[in-house]
Amino acid sequence: MAERKTEALHEKARGIDALAPLDALLLLASAQAEAALTPAASVNAISAGARLAADALQAGRRLVYAGAGSSGLMAMADALELPGTFGIPRERIAVLLAGGAESLLNLAGAPEDDLDAARADARREISKGDCVICVSASGSTPYTLALAQEAKALEACVVSIANNAGTPLLTLADAAILLETPPEMISGSTRMGAGTAQKIALNMFSTLMAIHLGHVHDGRMVNLVADNMKLRQRAAGIVADIAGVDSDNAAGCIEAADGAVKTAILLAAGAKDRSEAEAILSRTSANVRAALKLLGRA
């Protein structure tokens, strides 16, 4: 069987241990930058995956992120940011890691081979219509592959991210995101180039998903719910910028909306009260641009 790119040695890696420290670091930085370019070649697949995820959430279903080892950590990082950044309810998101919570303290290799655990995790957390995001650098990690197979059997859609072409995880996916990163500077250490590309692709995927859901307006995270001082200050800035009001007015609207930024924007833009603002959001599927248009503020 041909050697996978993720297991090969980068052509510039030989002798890296004999380089001066700064030269070694520059070489590592160059390799990371090279890997970071790869998601741009997969925008069609990333777009397809984002659409599937948005459709699942709009239908009342869940996002389930899954993986093992460093790929699992990349998946988890994206999942955990969604409530705070885009206001997606925590109960609409699940994270399945090989080895469970213990793997957050000890990334042992054995759990990634546990097919029974993968199937049990899938049956416990995945339902028909969910969107399951499976991340595996190799594209054939047993835990992740078995979980994806079980997800398909449960009639969930599968978005797969892998760094090797033609691998089983990509073959079975509804949206197959191939990130053909170069070989690693440290052969097989996929937390490096492969992980960098995965993180970028996940950032792109979840941000486009949020755009589809109407949670982004002019580069602002308008579905934020401000529940602490820092977020209230950020939210007031968002309201001031979009509605064109001063900071005191924006802060007052945030208070009146109990921290809900979309509602506060409409209050600042002329909605007579919170009930009217929420009714307009309901009529426009919570899309701020459409809601502002109804208020004559497009």
Image (cartoon, grey):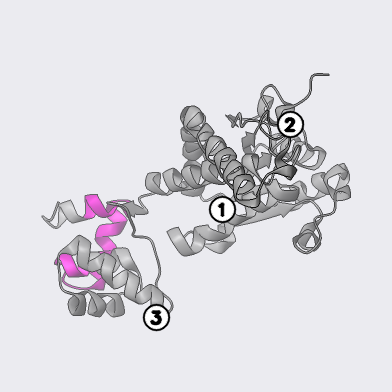
Which residue in the rendered view is the most extreme toward the left?
296
Q: Which mark is residue 101?
A: none
Q: Is residue 1 magenta?
A: no
- The residue identified by callout 3 is 229
Mark 2 belongs to which amino acid?
Leu
Rate crowding at label 2 as few (under 14), some (14 to 19) or many (20 or more) other CA atoms within 10 Å.
Answer: some
Residue 179 showing in the rendered view: yes
Mark closer to the observer (2, 1): 2
So how many labels did they put on this image?
3
What is the spatial separation of the Cα atoms under label 1 and label 3, in whole angstroms? 24 Å
- The residue identified by callout 2 is 9
- Mark 3 or mark 2: which comes first in sequence? 2
Which of the 4 quarters of the picture holds residue 243?
bottom left
Residue 130 showing in the rendered view: no
Q: Secondary structure at mark 1?
A: helix
Measured along the vertical axis of the image, is residue 11 above or below residue 257? above
Mark 3 belongs to which amino acid?
Met
Q: Position of residue 76 (x, y in %)?
A: 63, 54
- Mark 1 or mark 3: which comes first in sequence? 1
Rate crowding at label 1 as few (under 14), some (14 to 19) or many (20 or more) other CA atoms within 10 Å.
Answer: some
- The residue identified by callout 1 is 78
Q: Residue at x 64, y 45 (%)?
A: 24
Q: Are marks 1 and 3 in contact (CB under 8 Å)?
A: no
Q: Secondary structure at mark 3?
A: helix
